[in-house]
Amino acid sequence: MASLKNMLGNKFKHLTVFAFDRLDKRGQAKWLCNCICGRIVSVNGNALRSGKTTSCGCKRGGRTAMTGQTFNNVRVIKFDRVDHNRQARWWCECLRCGNIFSTLGNSIARGLTTSCGCLKAENLTWRGGHPTHGESGRGRQTKEYRSWRNMITRCLNKNTPYYKNYGGRGITVCKRWQKFENFLSDMGRAQGPKLSIDRIDNEGGYWCGKCEQCLDSGRPMNCQWKTRQRQNRNRRGNRLITFNGETQTLQDWAEKIGLTRAALSARLENGWPLEKTFSQSMAMRTRHGRYIGSKSPEYVSWQSMLLRCRDKRLKRYGGRGITVCERWLKFENFLADMGPRPKGLTLDRIDNNGNYEPGNCRWATRNEQSLNKARRSVSINSIRQVEQ
């Protein structure tokens, strides 16, 4: 340890050794050193003796100790760290507002940093004595500003890859909306994070409907805030179908009829006429007052009841003689007697040895059904003990 003690108090350029730190994984000594900038670092002893390490990083690449110096409206307090780009950062005080912040030493020395950001905020709010919207700052752009900027870019910038689908095919932005403040005043804020700007007439442009250019051309207001799902149904490539004087996309017709889009598309591709496609679907939908494509909870319970009572292999149901009364063989009668099925409940027989019939069934939770099964098992065991 004598060799280790000999380094205590030694000065290696900008570093002064004041304590032993530890032995690293390779058995080499590391020493705690005080840098001229005031930062404490742990340095390999060999790196100190060879002159490879001469500072904590504040002097690397020609950097100078800046503690206590003032540049414009910024006073340097102390060294902060070396960032991932191997550049020194310093803690500084803004003399304009008193805020403490960290910035690059190179930026301070070159005069690029003149405040903590408060001066830039003032410049964004006032330019030449005229107020600006203040919604386009870096990292603080609003949703409405991004929508406006993208609208302008794809309609007016010929270098963007989206220009061919917008400006290239005649989609324009009216003169009033080429200024963001007017666009925000007419459109208002988007009332939701998933909303974006959509053109009502997909062949029309981005028109406000109130400027001189729109009034002279007879252009109405053509924009609205809509979700991506609704915008996809307003695309040029959508398949539009007209039936009974109503024109909708294939997806809209599928939702109205109660079928999936794939099922409706398959019918049309197989050559079904529109009258048969839509009228038959509507008749199927209103058979039980439920959609065929999405069965109701009551219908699922009724169907399951019939299946387990007809299957003789199920020992707890059809295998031991549990049946469904004749009235409940029709779903309409079952629904009229049992009523709507509450959420979280399923069909249960009050008397586990009885059949599925009015007066012996109820909507119950799983816990209630389990207790019903437990009482039945206890009663059967009690009977067996008495018989023995």
Image (cartoon, rainbow, N blue to C red):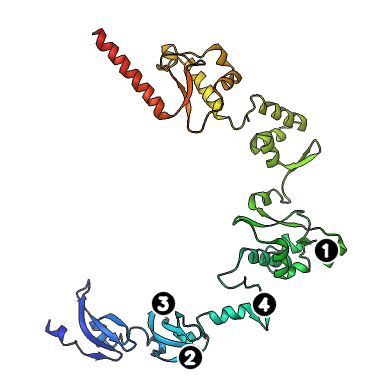
* Residue type, numbered disc 4: Pro
> In this rendering, does residue 311 appear at all?
yes
State the image coordinates of residue 15 (x, y, percent, origin top left).
28, 88
State the image coordinates of residue 33 (x, y, percent, origin top left).
26, 84
Residue contact at pointers 2 and 3, CB within 8 angstroms: no
Mark found first going from the N terminus, 1 or 3: 3
Mark 3 highlights which residue?
83
Q: CA distance from mark 1 to mark 4?
A: 27 Å
Q: Using residue 38 as the reference point, say whether residue 163 is left or right of it.
A: right
Front residue of 271/122: it is 122
Mark 4 highlights which residue?
131
Q: Nearer the viewer, mark 2 or mark 3?
A: 2
Q: Quadrant of residue 101?
A: bottom left
Mark 1 highlights which residue?
214
Q: Crowding at label 3, few (<14), some or many (≥20) Cα neighbours within 10 Å?
A: few
Against 244, residue 92 (above or below) is below
Mark 2 highlights which residue?
71
Front residue of 361/31: it is 361
Q: CA distance from mark 1 to mark 2?
A: 53 Å
